[in-house]
Image: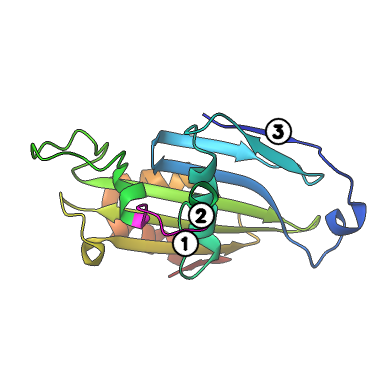
Amino acid sequence: SPQVTGSLFESDALINSPSAFLLQQLEVFNWGPFEGLRSANFDPQGTAIIGATGSGKTTLIDALMTLITAQPKYNLASTGGHESDRDLVSYIRGVSGAGNDTGDNQHIARPDKTITAIHACFFNGQQQVHIAALFSFEGTSSTYDDLKRLWFFVEDADWSLEYWLSLYHQGGTAAVKSAVKDINGVKLF
């Protein structure tokens, strides 16, 4: 897996600016090849994501791009800006490679009912803002139209991706929507 290291440069003006929200943490759950919950912390002084080819550097960047862009273009770092075979569904399913003609699904890590989540925390020195998404398939479909999506925007509230994943596992989308009603600062889309 890739390593995230910090403190590469000094930029006190940006770090202490109340209008600039800097990435503080990125979490992924069952995203691409990453099984379970994985977390990376980012230093406001600067952070580098380093690792061998195929270790997941671009996969982490694509997770962040999923949260902050309307129509992310995946795997651009690895393809030199050219069209990629990766898409949101392939990251959720954990697809590795193109498969084969035998009909088996060994190249798909999560072929059945599954949930994937991404969470990013941003901080401006005074306030944290969280953006998160839960994606799920109820069955074996890999059709984008069958994908369920919940997006969170959180201001001035404690946030725990593990809590929301636990709620989802207990009662699905209904449990998450019900819990959001009782928490100020959490908006669900």
Dot 1: element = loop
Mark closer to the chain start, 3 or 2: 3
Dot 2: element = helix
Cα separation between marks 3 and 2: 22 Å
**Foreground residue, 56 or 17?**
56
Mark closer to the chain start, 1 or 3: 3
- Crowding at dot 2, Cα within 10 Å, few <14 / some 14-19 / many 20+, comes out as some
**Foreground residue, 81 or 184?**
81
Q: Amino acid at mark 1?
A: Lys
Q: Which residue is mark 2?
A: 76
Residue 71 is situated, as x and y percent measured from the top left of the image, at 46, 69
The magenta-colored residue range is: 81-88
Residue 45 is situated, as x and y percent measured from the top left of the image, at 82, 44
Q: Amino acid at mark 3?
A: Thr
Cα separation between marks 1 and 3: 25 Å
Is residue 87 found inside the magenta-colored segment of the image?
A: yes
Q: Which residue is mark 3?
A: 5
**Viewer-nearest of discs 1 and 3:** 1
- Identify the image quadrant of the C terminus: bottom left
Residue 70 is situated, as x and y percent measured from the top left of the image, at 48, 70
Q: Is residue 76 above or below residue 20?
A: above
Q: Amino acid at mark 2?
A: Leu
